[in-house]
Structures are given as C-alpha cells and as structure tokens.
Image (cartoon, coloured by chain):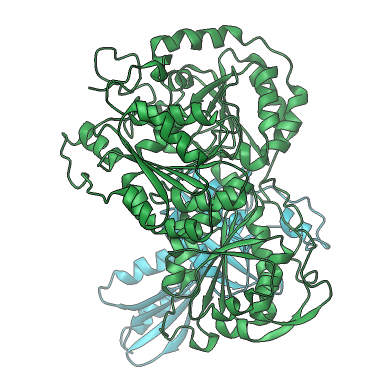
Chain colours: A green, B cyan
Amino acid sequence: MTTKPKPPSSNSHFTTPTRLTGAEIIWATLVGEGVDTVFGYPGGTILPAYDALRKFPIRHVLVRHEQGAAHMADGYARASGKVGVAIATSGPGSTNLVTGIATAMLDSIPMVCITANVSSKLLGTDAFQEVDITGITLPVTKHNFLVNRVEDIAPTLRHAFQIARSNRPGPVLVDITKDAEIASTVFDFDAARPPAYRPHPMLRVEESGLAQAAELIRNSKRPMILAGHGVTESGAMEQVRTLAERAEIPVAMTLLGIGGFPASHPLNLGMMGMHGESWVNSSIQEADLLIACGMRFDDRVTGKLNEYALKAKKIHIEVDPAEINKNVKVDVALVGDLREVLESLLPRIAGRDGSAWIKAIEAGKGAVAVRDIKNLPDSGHLYAAHVMNDLWRITKGDAVVVTDVGQHQMWEAQYFHHEKPRTLITSGGLGTMGFALPAAIGAKVACPDKEVWVIVGDGGFQMTACELATIVQEKLKINIAVINNGYLGMVRQWQEFFYERNYEATPLVSPDFVKLADAHGIAGRAVKTRGEVDSTVAEARAHSGAFLLNFLVEKEDSVYPMIPAGSALHEMIRRPGKNPLVETAQDD
Amino acid sequence: MQHTFVFYVEDKPGVLTRVASLFRRLNINIISLTVGRSERPGLSRMTLVCEASAEAGHRIRASLFKLENVVDVDDIAHAPVVTRELALIKVAATPQNRAQIFDLVEVFRAHIVDLTSESLMIEMTGVESKIEGLIEVLREDEGRILEICRSGKMTMRRGHHVSNVLRAMGAAEANVEEPTDSVQPEKEAAVVEPE
C-alpha cells in the first residue's frame, strides 16, 4: 500500500442515485469499492443484509467460525494486496472476529469488518446478542464506526475503505444497527465519497535527511539493509533491490519481510532475529550502518535492546511516525512511504564497493552456512526441516505458503526460499495459532490459479480445523501439510531450554488427521519417512481437490539457532551434537 | 517529565474514550484532562497533562494523530504558554473562625462563592502551584477541607499561533505569524507568569 490510496473503481452497481434499503446499500457500496468476495457467517441482526445479497455480484464464502472469516479476509488481503472483507452478526458473531482483527492490526493488513448490531433503540439495553463491539475492538482496529442511520452507511463504509488502505494499512470495523439495515434512502455512491485523504501530518522527508542518509551510506564500511513488511506493503521491491545492488549492501529480512527481496539474490543474507541465521545476527551486531526499510525493530528482531547493533548508525525509513525511536533510537528518520522515499534517495546514491564487508560476512558464515539437509541419508527419521526443504524443492518455490505459528513457522522461514512478495503468508506480530488454514482459504480465493500450501502444526491445526468444511463447500484446491510432532512444539522447546524439560501441558493427543480429512471428503496420507515425501507431495499436488499430508515428524526436535527472549543478538543457542556448527536437522 | 498536549478533536460520541484508551494502551497515567468546545464549530479542544519519559512526547503526538478523530496536536513542551486551573474548595468554617479564611482568600486572590453557617466555598483560578499553595495552607488545620474539585490544566500558547494543520484547513486567515513547529523545542518563555 502506498500512502496515497488508489481511488476505488467506479463500477458501482448503481450508476445513478437509487432508493435502496440499508442492507442493499452495504453490498452496493462494497461493489463500488471493487469488492467481489466476502467471508462471513449469518445471524439474527445481519439477516437483512444476507437477504439482499443475491442481488449483487459478490461471492460469499460461508465460514465455520467467525474467527475464520477474519483470518480469511486477512489472507485474502495479504495474497492480493486488496482490502479483505469479513461479515458477522451481532454479539458472539462479532466477538469471534476479534482475534482475527488483532492479527491484522499487528501486521498492518487492510481489512474491513462489517458487523450488525441490535436496533438502535435497543442499544445499551443488554438485548439478545447485543455487545459493544466498537468498544471491544477499539484498541485492535485502526478505527471503527457505529452506524445507526441508513444515510450514514455508504459514506461510512467508503471512509472505512479509505482508512484501511491509507498510510499504514490496518483493519477497520463498521458496526451497523439492524434498523439502519431495514430503513431505506437514496444511494449515491459518488456523493458518499469520503473527505479528502489526509496524510499523517508528521510524515517528513526533508532534503537534509536524504542528504544525511546518502552520506551515511557513502561513508559506511559495514552497511546492512533491514527489509520489513513495508517493502511489500509499499510495493518497494524494485527500489530496495536497486539500492542494495547499486551500493552493494547486503540485505537481511524480518519474518514478514520474506519475499520482499528474492531469496536467491546474492546480496540476500536471510532472516534476522530470534530464529534468524546466525551470520545475519552477527553481522547486525558488527554493522556500522543499518538501513531499516519498513520494519519496526520488533523485540523478536532486536533481542536485548541496549546491546542491539551498538556499532551502527541507523537510518529508519517508515510510514508510521509513531514507530520512530520507539524501540531503537535512530540517527536519520525518513518518515514516509518507503517506495517514495527510496525514489527520492536513490538519485543521491552512487556506486560503491561493498565487497570487503560482504566477503567478511561470507567468511563468518563458516560451516554454519551448510544447510545440506537435502543430501542427508534417510535415517528413518523425518524432520520438519526436511519437509520444508523438500516442499520448496518440489514446488520450485512457486507456491503461496501459508504458515501457522510455532516451530514449523520458523523452519519454513529457514528452509523454504521465497523469491516473490506475497508468497509467504504468516501471522508475525500477534503470532496467532489457528491462522494458517483460514488464511490459506482467503489466499486461494484471491489467487485461484496459484498453488497454495498450508503448513501448520498439530496444535494450531486443531484450533481452526473446522474450516476444512469450508474448503470442501467452496471446492478449493488447497494442499495441507500438518507438521505433527505430538507436542505444542515451540512451547515444548522453551520448556526444554528454560524450564528444565518440564513438559507441562504440551504433549498433545490428536485425532487421526487423515481420517478427519476423509470425514470432510478431503483425501490424505500419513508420511512417516523421508523416502515417502517426494511421492506423497507429488500425489497431493496432482490430486484435483484439497489434499492433507500428515507428516509424523521427530517429536522433540528444536528450532536452531535461537536467541532466548531478552538476550542480545550474539547470544545464540546452537544445535548441540557432534557437529554443533552444522545447523542441519540431525538431532539424535 | 510532565508533558502537556493541546489538541483538537471532532466533537462526536466516543472520541474521549479513544483518547483515554490510547494513553491506557501506552501505559501512561493521565494527570489531568480538560475538554470543552473550541472556536471552531464541530471541534472540541483538549488539554492533557501526563507523566512520561522525555522521549515519549514524539510518540504520543504521533499516536494521537493516528486517531481518526484527532484533527491537530500541539506538544507544548517548552513553548511560552498561559496555563490556568480552576479549583472549588469547600472548607468547614463557623462564624467564629471565618475571618481567618477570609484573610487567606484575600492573600491568594481567590473568591468566596458560597457561605453557610457551617461551611464556605472558595473559587480560585491560577497556576497549579498557586492552587497547591492555598490547599496546603488550608490543610494546616486538620479536617477543615471538606471537598476539593479541580478542573485540571487549561493551556494556550502566547501570541498569535495557528498550527500548520489548522492553517491547511483554512483556519489562519487573520494570523500573520509563521506557525511554530511544535516538534522542535522552543526557547523558554521570556514572559513572566503573572500571579
């Protein structure tokens, strides 16, 4: 998303002002805003809207739980770059959205949630299925609205889309009372245009700042680009690449920055942070200049703040002024849309020889860079890292991968290499288990021609497994890889490292996921050894419908390297064993 | 340190909650908050005082601006301003000991606005320290103060001042002075705060 929102397509269903009910106005406005798909669940107060739905060219995906609707709208937005839309009824319907809204908020995803509420005369009376959803979602939305007059529906919805898309994107909730849905008024899409878009008044890219940044880059010996989610959100992939190539600056990515810079690019060092590559974190600690592009110095990225990159000057290019100096004090702040800022900065950047620093980083990698898992003999053990690497090799990386949260999420980030933006969809900021399956449904609906893989742990899968039925009802071809280790793996890993292997409440008894898939009419296979991976993945890909692979992986494997929470970046826990340097999946 | 923000918000239901919720989320305690209508129709003016680290001012201002209903934010910091607070203080006083309080009120240039046989009410306007001073003196006699009601600080910059934002909205027709950028620390006021 750029700071200047694109105007919605003017293909409103109604080209001339027409008298409509509030329920009809909801859909007519969505059509005008370019929406063709929504994810929702009906109920008492939203019934008037559902009654009017058939008159409009909108695909409605019926979810099994409203949390799924929010994650689907989120996945749809992440995969397409468009605004995702979720619909729910009042009371529990709206509260069920909350986890999904917070997930979108933490990752700056443009989303509009429409909920219905009881009639305005009943507001505040504790009526059946009444809940103060605007109050509840206030801290987890970019903004929210309560609409109780039919005349306000179209302008409010249009304003909601503008807010969701503009500046730093985010979720907006519009709560509409039932009486406003039922009443009617003249619908005029153009007249409902929101007030002129106003950029955040503290956006500031000054000549002096650009000159200072250019000089810091020119004089630096050990610079690094830190590429975050903003690279994709702003569409600044080319600009970041040009900067990196012209000035020969190596690039490190945050989890959500993956895909914003090609994995195969020689300047791409890999992921930073808690489970980032050891040489990336070491390089950050050694760097004399960090150029942070659309990232927010999250604690999972910085580790212990007062020992973070002490030798480096910092340039922060960021669209949200409230992120400047929040966690890390920076030397130059360029506050604006990343692409626009880089376009202003690039003419000041001359060619620069960065080879000495790049060689030093390469030398520092040593044996730890050997991630030679594809050549490991089949010892009978199946490691999750094998699965990730094989999936990447078999799909040639040409797939949209949607991961859940936990160990498998980190292994995916380490072993599946992404060349293009929007090919890794994952819950970064909030770390929401149960995200993957519904978000993948949203991604597949947004990109029906792309191969979509869900990678999910046995814990997270069971949080939203009800959406398997949605996959079947919508006839979606989604491949599901359950990384099944019989534990809540990441929590178990923390218990192993920090709680003396007290595995309290982490061993997990699960149903037979292949049978569960079968009960839904989804084909599946259990995979127990490395040797079966190729053939079963090929079978899943070739199958016409959705397919579930239940990978029964090593139970007590851990993600390495790891920086314990609150430790400095160089204080890594390395894989124990015969060859501690080789961070491969050969635990025993 | 104490931060003072003066900001304009849309006069709509729920806006106060959004402002208060922001400070709650940032884990910052609001010391005082005054709200009232402003010179601009449809906009309310708030003066908010809070305790936060010296570096927090920038983030608070940026976060306030992120609220859709907030139109303009001025971080007063060290700018020359006039600050006032209104206090109503009810004290126990009988016809026998009233005279002493009358004297006090005279010294502090306050007013008596209500008088009964058992109590009287003092109205006082001034800077915070002056009000604190009166309360301290009244407290010398234990149990004398029955009620205190304080408005919280109201703050206005000295001289002509219209922010960039309000200027962009067409609010600055009559003002010729260049707007001061409130992000930049400004030199201390040369004007002496009158009693």
Q: Is residue A218 above or below residue A260?
A: above
Q: Residue at x 66, y 25 (%)?
A: A241
Q: Is residue B174 above or below residue A484?
A: below
Is residue B24 in view from this perspective?
no
Quadrant in which residue A257 is drawn? top right
Quadrant in which residue A377 is drawn? top left
Where residue B185 appears, as percent x and y from the top left, is 61, 43
How many numbered discs, if any? 0
Q: Nearer the viewer, residue A255 or B84?
A: A255
Where residue A122 appears, as percent x and y from the top left, is 48, 87
Side (left or right) of A563 relative to B186: left
Q: Residue at x 37, y 69 (%)?
A: B135
Furthest residue to the bottom?
A: B117
Where residue A468 appears, as percent x and y from the top left, is 43, 56
Q: Split into 4 quadrants, where in the image is the C terminus of chain A? A: top left
Quadrant in which residue A524 is drawn? top left
Where residue A534 appears, as percent x and y from the top left, is 43, 29
Side (left or right) of A395 relative to A578: right
Side (left or right) of B72 relative to A287: right
Is residue A114 in view from this perspective?
yes
Q: Nearer the viewer, residue B174 or A520?
A: A520
Q: Nearer the viewer, residue A577 or A164?
A: A577
Q: Nearer the viewer, residue A517 or A558?
A: A517
